[in-house]
């Protein structure tokens, strides 16, 4: 190999006659081109194993390589393809908030059915993930009528209840804890839940009670449709609450979890999540599960004062929880005994008690009219905004949400018990709530007149495709501080 000196640099002539630059400046080098943008990849939708939702509602798409500026989200069902360009505020390199279209403008998607979701950027088109489109209902809360079904085995207040779906036509109800008028209990009951909302004739006492007596806690259920647990898996959580009736007001930071067998409703052994307790001990927190995260808002501290704290924790695939995060966007007002739910990319907190108390069972004062919402995505809670307030100032009440309609019910509120016992609103496309309307005809009232009751929306739709709302137990207003009841109510129409 020979070496030659050139006035523009040093060159080496190899054995095969090739020429390569090995030194000297003066223009012999160049900047390598930037790497091509990454192809986007979707890891999940709504932090769920089998994501489910209706059209015209926002979903959360998680993954990587989405880039900083919005690209496109494509929804495909057979020959129908609809392309959406989400707002810049809902787009990041790892997360997208997009509203599911009802079709391509000419032909509507079929629901129930499935669509394939892909993300397209300058880097290419992502893998496709299946989104299950659910049937929607145009029911009117003004047509809801009520009756009773199988009562609880024992009168209880401050209890909690969830439903576990077994099939499209069957489910199970799990009821835990509560105050029996004398003491808090650890009992867990189960029963069947029919498509029409009625319960089986007999309740079963679970052989796996709560590890301690508990009342006024939060309780939610995780499944493959709302979290990343495996298909056909179900976990229920008991979060915070008052351990002993004599506590003033008490409160624990313990989080218990148990599995539920969807084939027979059997509750497994409860385990304490000792590595992920609540950051604070709380009685009467507002708790919900939304898009793979558990959210906890407000609550009464052991110092007898309400809190503004909002916490969130991811649900792991094995049913455990990730670390709790305290939101930097606290509630504008400290409250306890409020209600909360997630819908369309937002977290909502309704009503609540702004006053401190040593007795969670007291009924001396009314609550708040306030209704607030904040963006909620992957556990991060945005800035809170006030939307239309409820007619009544409620606390220790119940809230049902189905297909964009909200029913606020029961609780301790201003006026006589039974006067505007129920009121309703709808969720606007921008997430705000429409003005509340009272449901006042006598035949449309529950006539329960209770507070500290349990409630849930059945995961099953009636044969006509309408939701069923259940109200369980609670304290009546017949005496102070209230007398627990065993009655269970459900709607029979529409």
Image (spheres, rainbow, N blue to C red):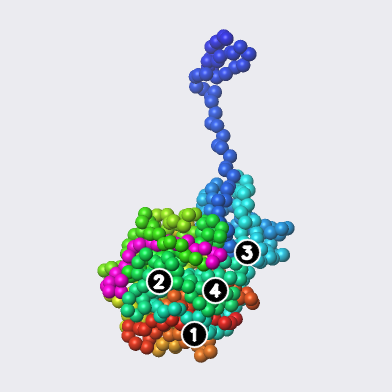
| In this rendering, the label closer to the viewer, 3 or 2 | 2
Dot 3 or dot 2: first in sequence order is 3
The reply to whether discs 3 and 4 touch (Cβ–Cβ < 8 Å) is no
Percent x, y of residue 394 = 40, 79
**385 or 370: nearer the viewer:** 370
Q: Is residue 254 within the magenta segment?
A: yes
Residue at label 4? 193
Q: Residue at x 58, y 13 (%)?
A: 13
Residue at label 1? 446
Mark 1 and mark 2: span between their CA atoms? 26 Å
**130 or 18: nearer the viewer:** 130
Mark 4 and mark 2: span between their CA atoms? 19 Å
Mark 3 and mark 2: span between their CA atoms? 37 Å
Dot 3 or dot 1: first in sequence order is 3
Q: Looking at this view, name the residue that lies furthest to the front.
A: 207
Percent x, y of residue 380 = 44, 58
Dot 4 or dot 1: first in sequence order is 4
As drawn, is 253 to the left or to the right of 197? left
Residue at label 3? 133
Q: Please give the range of residues in magenta.
A: 244-264
Q: Looking at this view, name the residue that lies furthest to the top.
A: 2
Dot 4 or dot 2: first in sequence order is 2
Dot 1 or dot 2: first in sequence order is 2
Percent x, y of residue 451 = 40, 80
Residue at label 2? 187
Mark 3 and mark 4: span between their CA atoms? 23 Å
Q: Residue at x 45, y 69 (%)?
A: 206
Q: Within 10 angstroms of label 2, few (less than 14), some, or many (20 or more) residues? A: many
Q: Within 10 angstroms of label 1, few (less than 14), some, or many (20 or more) residues? A: many
Q: Quadrant of the N terminus?
A: top right
């Amino acid at each position: 190999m020979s070496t030659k000196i050139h006035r523009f640099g040093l060159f080496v002539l190899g054995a095969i006659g090739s020429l390569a630059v090995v030194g000297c400046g003066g223009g012999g080098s160049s900047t390598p081109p930037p790497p091509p943008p990454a192809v986007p990849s979707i890891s999940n939708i709504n932090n769920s194993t089998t994501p489910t939702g209706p059209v015209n509602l926002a979903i959360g798409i998680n993954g990587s390589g989405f880039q900083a500026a919005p690209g496109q989200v494509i929804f495909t069902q057979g020959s129908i393809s609809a392309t959406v360009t989400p707002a810049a505020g809902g787009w990041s390199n790892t997360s997208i908030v997009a509203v599911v279209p009802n079709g391509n403008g000419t032909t509507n998607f079929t629901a129930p059915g499935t669509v394939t979701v892909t993300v397209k950027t300058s880097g290419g088109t992502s893998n496709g993930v299946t989104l299950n489109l659910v049937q929607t209902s145009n029911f009117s809360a003004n047509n809801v009528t009520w009756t009773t079904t199988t009562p609880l085995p024992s009168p209880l207040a401050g209890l909690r209840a969830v439903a576990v779906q077994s099939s499209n036509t069957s489910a199970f109800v799990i009821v835990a804890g509560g105050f029996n008028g004398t003491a808090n209990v650890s009992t867990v009951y189960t029963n069947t839940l029919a498509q029409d909302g009625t319960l089986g004739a007999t309740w079963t006492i679970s052989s796996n009670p709560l590890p301690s007596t508990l009342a006024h806690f939060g309780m939610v259920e995780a499944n493959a449709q709302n979290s990343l647990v495996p298909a056909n898996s179900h976990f229920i959580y008991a979060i915070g609450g008052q351990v002993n009736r004599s506590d003033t007001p008490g409160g624990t930071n313990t989080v218990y979890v148990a599995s539920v067998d969807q084939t027979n409703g059997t509750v497994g052994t409860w385990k304490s999540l000792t590595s992920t307790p609540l950051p604070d001990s709380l009685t009467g927190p507002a708790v919900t599960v939304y898009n793979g995260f558990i959210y906890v808002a407000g609550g009464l501290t052991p110092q007898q004062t309400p809190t503004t704290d909002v916490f969130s924790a991811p649900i792991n695939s094995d049913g455990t929880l990730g670390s709790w995060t305290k939101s930097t966007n606290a509630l504008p007002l400290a409250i306890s005994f409020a209600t909360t739910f997630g819908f369309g990319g937002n977290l909502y907190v309704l009503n609540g008690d702004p006053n401190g108390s040593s007795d969670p069972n007291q009924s001396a004062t009314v609550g708040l009219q306030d209704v607030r919402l904040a963006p909620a995505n992957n556990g991060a809670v945005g800035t809170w905004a006030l939307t239309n307030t409820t007619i009544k100032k409620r606390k220790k009440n119940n809230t049902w949400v189905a297909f964009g309609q909200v029913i606020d019910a029961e609780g301790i509120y201003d006026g006589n018990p039974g006067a505007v016992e129920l009121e309703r609103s709808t969720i606007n496309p921008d997430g705000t709530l429409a003005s509340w309307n009272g449901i006042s005809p006598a035949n449309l009232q529950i006539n329960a007149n209770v507070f500290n009751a349990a409630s849930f929306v059945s995961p099953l739709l009636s044969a006509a495709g309408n939701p069923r709302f259940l109200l369980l137990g609670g304290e009546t207003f017949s005496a102070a501080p209230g007398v627990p009841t065993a009655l269970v109510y459900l709607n029979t129409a529409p």
